[in-house]
Amino acid sequence: SPNTNSVFNWPNQIARINVKPNSINSTSSILLNVENFDKQVLRSNYNRISDYYHLSPYEINFDKNIQIIFDLENNLYHDKHIYIMEFVSDDWIPLLTNKQNDEVSAFVDSGGVDALFVSDQELEIIPDEFEVFNIYPNPFNPITNIDFAIPYNSNVTVSVYDLLGARINTLVDNNLNEGMYQMQWNGNDMHGNSVASGIYFITVKFNETVITNKVTLLR
């Protein structure tokens, strides 16, 4: 459904996609499946550690970026540089990849072929623009995650407001370097007290640009 948040799991539980509301129009359908792929990585310092995951149809462009998530197995790669890569124009391109606990994730704006790679060197991947990718889960209890990226060093403020417009918490208000970030809100106000169930607004401000998302807290 285009108006609901959906998570689709491949049966082996290695990869899944998180589709935000209104990411695709009502006449489109998408499929995540494993198939062989004959395109090898052109760089010698990458090793593929997953199957090839085909997000089809390839020609689809999403109205909102879709999150692709890979589960890490057996803690084998927790100390390695891991990247989700996408096959584009006859080469594998590293995506801006977030590593969190036992999973890694990235956002894609179209169909294509993706896989998980490990590298012996850390890559500097700089976002093209300021973007709030996802706030999930939503509704949530007790914690929701805020994923965003900034293209250069600047002050970033992440705040939470109630329905009356009162600021109830500030999650960060600092200069951040370019890159991808994940913040969390645990449903508390700035004094550490739990707030009531209901609708709240999370704003991410980068320079003079502010992006606001509505979230629902369920106690």
Image (cartoon, grey):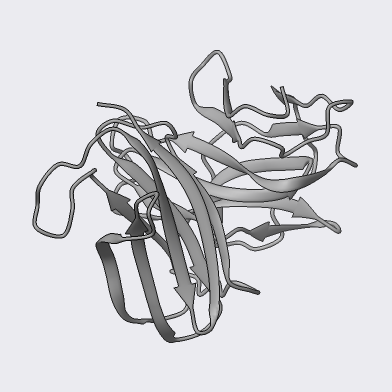
Q: Which of 125 and 132 is in front in this view?
A: 132
Q: Percent from the top left, x then y, of residue 121?
A: 44, 68
Q: Which of 33 and 153 is in front in this view?
A: 153
Q: Percent from the top left, x then y, of residue 82?
A: 45, 53
* Residue furthest front as drawn: 164
Q: Percent from the top left, x then y, of residue 156?
A: 40, 77
Q: Nearer the viewer, residue 17 or 80?
A: 17
Location of residue 6 with respect to 125 vertically, above or below: above
Residue 203 vs residue 219: left or right? right
The image quarter in which residue 32 lies: top right
Residue 14 shows in this picture: yes
Residue 136 vs residue 111: left or right? left
Name the residue located 45 percent from the left edge and 66 percent from the top edge. 204
Residue 190 vs residue 9: left or right? left
Q: How many marks?
A: 0
Residue 179 shows in this picture: no
Q: Which of 41 and 147 is in front in this view?
A: 147
The image quarter in which residue 167 lies: bottom left
Name the residue located 72 percent from the left edge and 39 percent from the top edge. 23
Name the residue located 45 percent from the left edge and 86 percent from the top edge. 153
Location of residue 201 with respect to 142 vertically, above or below: below
Q: Percent from the top left, x then y, of residue 189?
A: 18, 53
Name the residue located 71 percent from the left edge and 60 percent from the top edge. 42
The image quarter in which residue 28 lies: top right
Give the quarter of the figure containing the C terminus: top left
Give the quarter of the figure containing the N terminus: top right
